[in-house]
Amino acid sequence: MSKPDHATPHDQPQDVVESIVPLMPIVLPVAGAVLMFLLAFIAIFMA
């Protein structure tokens, strides 16, 4: 007999979005701080 073709969680490929979601509380503030710094630098440089 052939063995049953049940998909186990180990057979599933890792989703990129699901691997990034737990890091969002760290990534979003850091990205916001970098963006604010760059915008302030551009404003000061252009003034």
Image (cartoon, rainbow, N blue to C red):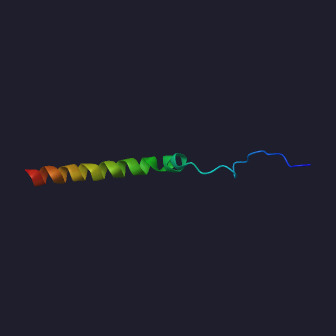
Asked whether, in this view, residue 9 is left or right of residue 45, the answer is right
Asked whether, in this view, residue 17 is left or right of residue 11, the answer is left
Foreground of the two, 42 or 1: 1
Picture residue at 25% right of the left edge, 49% below the top: 36
Residue 23 percent coordinates (x, y): 47, 50
Residue occupying the far front of the picture: 2
Picture residue at 43% right of the left edge, 47% below the top: 25
Residue occupying the far right of the picture: 1
Numbered disc total: 0
Residue 27 percent coordinates (x, y): 40, 51
Residue 29 percent coordinates (x, y): 36, 48
Residue 12 percent coordinates (x, y): 66, 49
Foreground of the two, 25 or 39: 39
Asked whether, in this view, residue 13 is left or right of residue 26, the answer is right
Picture residue at 50% right of the left edge, 46% below the top: 21
